[in-house]
Amino acid sequence: MFTGKGAIISPSAILGKNVRIGDRTIIYDNVEIGDNTVICNDCIIGEPLTAYYKDTDNYNNPKTIIGADSLVRSHTIIYAGNTIGDHFQTGHRVTLRENTIIGSHCSLGTLDDIQGNSRFGDYCRLHSNVHIGMHSVLGNFVFVYPYVVFTNDPTPPSDNLMGPSVGDYTQIATGSVLLPGIKIGKHCVIGACSLITKDVDDYMLAMGSPAQPVKNIREIIDRSTGKPHYPWPYYFDRGMPWSGVGYDKWKNETEK
Amino acid sequence: MFTGKGAIISPSAILGKNVRIGDRTIIYDNVEIGDNTVICNDCIIGEPLTAYYKDTDNYNNPKTIIGADSLVRSHTIIYAGNTIGDHFQTGHRVTLRENTIIGSHCSLGTLDDIQGNSRFGDYCRLHSNVHIGMHSVLGNFVFVYPYVVFTNDPTPPSDNLMGPSVGDYTQIATGSVLLPGIKIGKHCVIGACSLITKDVDDYMLAMGSPAQPVKNIREIIDRSTGKPHYPWPYYFDRGMPWSGVGYDKWKNETEK
Amino acid sequence: MFTGKGAIISPSAILGKNVRIGDRTIIYDNVEIGDNTVICNDCIIGEPLTAYYKDTDNYNNPKTIIGADSLVRSHTIIYAGNTIGDHFQTGHRVTLRENTIIGSHCSLGTLDDIQGNSRFGDYCRLHSNVHIGMHSVLGNFVFVYPYVVFTNDPTPPSDNLMGPSVGDYTQIATGSVLLPGIKIGKHCVIGACSLITKDVDDYMLAMGSPAQPVKNIREIIDRSTGKPHYPWPYYFDRGMPWSGVGYDKWKNETEK
């Protein structure tokens, strides 16, 4: 890896210090990559929009920004027009369509398909094979598990798209589907295979198809410990900014 | 792109006028590609069947046809033995197995997995990550949304496969699964996350797991406009042949 | 294919007799591949773990073993640290993370995503787009159909992961989700789109969301023949070791 074999880097691309580009990876026009970032083999960064194929000569590629200290794994395709923060990480074969804004410390899993025109806060983690439809909004610390789909068209087909929005710290378990325009609050937990057809209030566990509110997340008991597990920032800190500090202390300092 | 780096094109392939082939794309024996079609980087067109790996020397690749004015995006794999009409479009990393017939103006989304031996009419649109099992039949103007699966084996494992069939204009929303041999009529709407266990009559909205018929699609109200939205061809025409003409007028002229 | 263009093979890799390596495929350090195995184009075998990207110079790649007579189709990524038996087969774009042990005669379908630290018996068949979370255990002859997910975190996010386990001969139909730590017995059939929230006894048909036991699999009737179909080894033998012998005879001889 990083033998430089067959990589193509546009003369207009701006690479930070210590950036490594994998074999056969293509960096298109107007891409900016921050210091120490690794782009692995066979990636496409700044993939041109459809207009490029129709009139290649007159096409002008929108700016694409990937922050510092990031790791983009092999076969990932990031379209032009995205702005991504520092400490970004992907699995393999991620597709990120155009015009999405992603905060810092976010990760996208293998086979994730982000359809564009969406917005992610900081520290979002999407596991493998998540599909985010256009116009979705994710807060900070939103974790999404495999095979979850965010939809956006209430009367398909139409051009009246409305993305779902999800509040800070919310966890959306495997196989759940969010209907168009749904709002899920902060610190919620959505059970596996739920179909979210109505808004979900802050701090609620909701589940089922269609999903119903079940109880306050503070009442969920971790069967292995017999203790509560939510709000989860009190019980989990791997890779989180409150790691080694404690959530309350970090929160108080952050909110100052 | 289209620097010709590392592309391999079989001498027996027939490329129309103005065809562009991306870097490292492989065009195997007996492939025919229509005028103005673009095949992007890292695609495989005419992927040989399993027999090739067992006896490479005596293998004869079946004919593969892709129509004119098509756009096949990067990392797509189209097996030998497929016949695809004009104005075909794919997302990235589509897999299309052998012996499927696809009409004109169809599109397959990123990560779609079409298992072969199926038949698509004209103007079908499959969104990302749709799985079509063998022996499926789609009419014209069938739109299928992400994570829908067409199954085909009622008693797995067996060799007694029966694909589902779907009528003209039907819309199948995100995450639905069609059981083997199911027949869905024309102008139907299937709600998100439905499990289709029984045939669905023309013009029905069906939803649930297992799905039940709910009402005639003409009774569905678009909440944003307060008006009906189905049959959808009266309310949506982007990319459709009745665009700028009106559905009734187009239909009358087509049926003459 | 197999023109050797751009393939990179580590000097420490051990390739058996008659092994063929596709174009641009990368074989990393400490990979062992058995006789007659075919690795197609654009694969990565022995993909380094995350530590490699952090300190490339001091990284030592764990051993990766792929058995004889195997066929790994294009764009598949197999991480370092896996041990895979003979007669292994994959579709395209499979991802197999580290430290999984896979028996002989297993196949993984297109887009399968195996998260690592799992264990498969012999003759397991995973169809397309299956996601196996870490710490899962599959017996022998377990068949899994598209869009099935094995989960492992009962209180996400946490580091308290518990994979599901599935007994010999069990069939898990399309779109089902197994909750963390669930145990499914042997010779079970799980219906499509089931959410498995409780353990399932041997020889049971279970289905629904949440799934309920429905009946003994011996009572399932194949509608096309009017006869039973389970236990399936009496009715299906393609590619199975009892093919041409009969299941009972094979079983008696095996158990001697």
Image (cartoon, coloured by chain):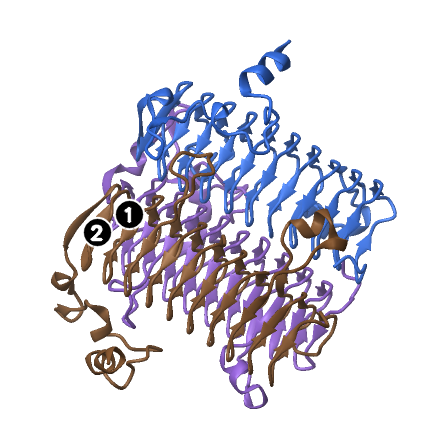
Chain colours: A brown, B blue, C purple
Residue furthest right as drawn? B11
Q: Which residue is mark 2?
A: A206
Residue at 12%, 69% in the rendered image: A226
Residue furthest top as drawn? B256
Q: Nearer the viewer, residue A101 or C179?
A: A101
Q: Nearer the viewer, residue B4 or A83?
A: A83
Q: Disc number at residue C104?
A: none
Snapshot quadrant of residue C158: bottom left
Q: Disc number at residue A194?
A: 1
For the residue carrying disc 2, how many other residues have a C-alpha within 10 Å: few (<14), some (14-19), or many (20+)?
many
Q: Are marks 1 and 2 in contact (CB under 8 Å)?
A: yes
Q: Where in the figure is residue A216, as x and y percent of width and height?
A: 13, 58
Residue at 29%, 73% in the rendered image: C159
Q: Quadrant of the C terminus of chain C?
A: bottom left
Q: Nearer the viewer, residue A26 or C153?
A: A26
Q: CA distance from mark 1 to mark 2?
A: 8 Å
Name the chain under label 1.
A
